[in-house]
Amino acid sequence: GENVEQHPSTLSVQEGDSAVIKCTYSDSASNYFPWYKQELGKRPQLIIDIRSNVGEKKDQRIAVTLNKTAKHFSLHITETQPEDSAVYFCAASRPGGTSYGKLTFGQGTILTVHP
Amino acid sequence: NAGVTQTPKFQVLKTGQSMTLQCAQDMNHNSMYWYRQDPGMGLRLIYYSASEGTTDKGEVPNGYNVSRLNKREFSLRLESAAPSQTSVYFCASSERRDTQYFGPGTRLTVL
């Protein structure tokens, strides 16, 4: 089955700096890659996603890049703010069949933004 | 719309006790999922239901059973709880292979 590795496990930055979180996946058939943000004690919420037919997607201060050849994708947060502090999870899923809709998650990155 | 709701929010069980975690969604989604979240291990899929009337095992199904009661509701049952099942449980739903929306979670402690 799919295996998703996420790095780093913790990331500490100063307010205004950029933060980058990287994930690698094992199943070359995977074609959907969402990123979730989870604040302390809250539910995971989707912040951005990318499908395998594009290499990059941007939404204000957040961007995701995908390298299908290398089987890795990254989350980029620019101009970080204290409210960006949370746990971030990457995930991957493959189309159809017995894996329909199933997401495999990375282990998570604890991002701390210091004022 | 309430989105995805879960009950209870907190539960403490003794080893060997049974319980059912309830999940409901009002977004008319076809697919529903149960995850457990343990420190340092991300979210792991226990069971999922691609559509009403179907259920399939995920990554960590042992010790659990599920019921897709109707399109709205998907329950998770622990028949004989064990300390290793102490975790936070999240239910989620999605339309096809689109965004998964999570419930608020159930924090379960098994003594």
Image (tube, coloured by chain):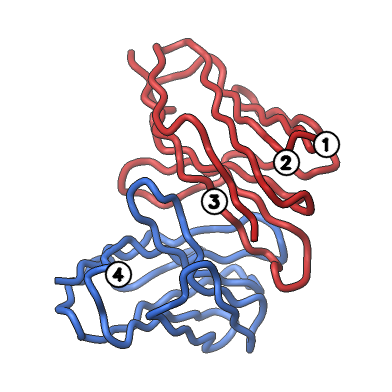
Q: Which residue is mark 4?
A: B85
The blue one among the chains is B
Q: Quadrant of the C terminus of chain A?
A: top left
Residue drawn at x 46%, y 69% as measured from the top left: B60
Q: Amino acid at mark 4?
A: Gln
Amino acid at circle 3: Phe
The answer to whether the residue labelled 1 contacts the one labelled 2, judged by CB atoms less than 8 Å apart, is yes
Q: Amino acid at mark 1?
A: Val
User: Which chain letter goes with mark 4?
Assistant: B
Chain letter behind tag 2: A
Q: Which chain is red?
A: A
Q: Residue at x 60, y 22 (%)?
A: A61
Chain containing the residue with disc 3: A
Q: Position of residue A88 (x, y in %)?
A: 48, 38
Q: Circle 3 sits on which residue?
A: A105
Are the residues tagged 1 and 3 within 8 Å (C-beta)? no
N-terminal-most mark, 2 or 3: 2
Q: Are marks 4 and 3 on the same chain?
A: no
Residue to which mark 2 is pinned: A50
Quadrant housing residue B51: bottom right
Q: Is residue B76 above or below residue B93?
A: below
Q: Do the residues at pointers 2 and 3 share their chain?
A: yes
